[in-house]
Amino acid sequence: MSAPGLLQLSWRPYRFVLPRRLITSGGALVERSGWLLRLHAPNGELGWGEGAAPLLTPAPPELAAAVAALPTTLARQELEQHILQLPAPLACAVGMALAELDGCGAADAGCWQRAPRSAWLLPAGDAALAELERVLASEADSESPVTFKWKVAALPDAEERALLDALLQWLPASARLRLDANGGWDVATAHRWADRLADELRLQWLEQPLAPLELSELARLGARLPVALDESLPHLLPQQRDAWPGWLVRRPLQEGDPRPLLQQLQTGLPRQMISTAFETGIGRRFVEHLAALQAQGPTPAAPGLAPGWQPDGPLFATDPEQAWEAAA
């Protein structure tokens, strides 16, 4: 039990392997790791959180050191101060758990909301065509448009441009397509793709076509066709983020305390696409809730939850107790 007036923090590390390798311009995503947080309030209520290690890079040792250094019992005000100093993944876990203690997901607040239908994530290379065919067959009876996100800048450009032509031949007229280069194109390559896609009505956006710091070139490209920022976001000042005219790809488990984003989505912040960091069931519950709020706002868009790219099992259960026990 926690001491009177104090919150009790318990952490558990987790690690899991994806069911298949996700090839990107930055390398192959094979496994995920991070920490689960159980926050026990003095009144007996529980808040659950998750902090995921960065994508495509090993978890830096300072994350484990920060977990070890954090006191196991803290007053609420003290914990709020600690959040300001924590690495972003751990700040996310604490903010997520505090949001739950404050009523996020409670019955009188509408409970945890389920996300709308996600965009489908297509793998890099010619495997995208087989996956596209499989998904279209599974969606044959659906009356709603389907959205696809394809990983590009992972193979030689000429090969991918030929695959684009084949993919567009298969893609229904009602479908939407996002191309995610993960910052892997140079300026000339990005503009060649823009030339090809300038009149493509099914294109929803190019996602992070250029390196994160090439903001002026990203803006120039964004004047030609829609561009969504992802990896650039940590490098932007708040006023730069607010001024970007296109979409922002929000990956809550990588951004720090998620409560500001939660509040913004509750008040209708436009052009925010909620995306997965390949989390466990605890993080997924919160991410889906944010995606549902986004869908109720002024610019609804299919979230990027990568269906079919995460394992099954108790670690991915929507019941946080099951996920917690599975991480033991």
Image (cartoon, rainbow, N blue to C red):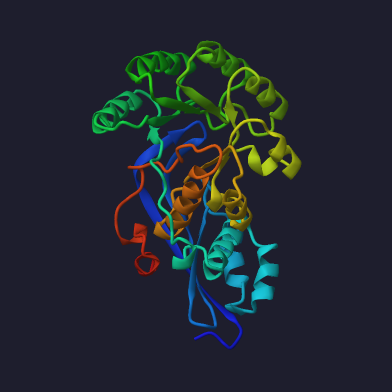
Residue 63, x across and y down, in percent: 58, 60
Question: Is residue 56 in view from this perspective?
Answer: no
Residue visible at 35% across and 26% down in the picture: 128
The residue shown at (47%, 28%) is: 178
Query: Residue at the spot x=51%, y=63% of the render?
Result: 104
Q: Residue at x 48, y 77 (%)?
A: 45
In the rendered view, would you say 97 is above or below 292?
below
Where is 105 relative to 265, above or below? below
Q: Is residue 319 left or right of residue 223?
A: left
Q: Give the quarter of the figure containing the C terminus.
A: bottom left
Q: Is residue 221 visible?
A: yes
Q: Position of residue 212 (x, y in %)?
A: 64, 34
Q: Quadrant of residue 318?
A: bottom left
* Residue 277: x %, y % from top left: 48, 47
Report how many numbered discs are placed on residues in the image: 0
Residue 247 in percent (x, y) is at: 59, 34
Location of residue 146 by image quarter: top left
Residue 231, by quadrant, is top right
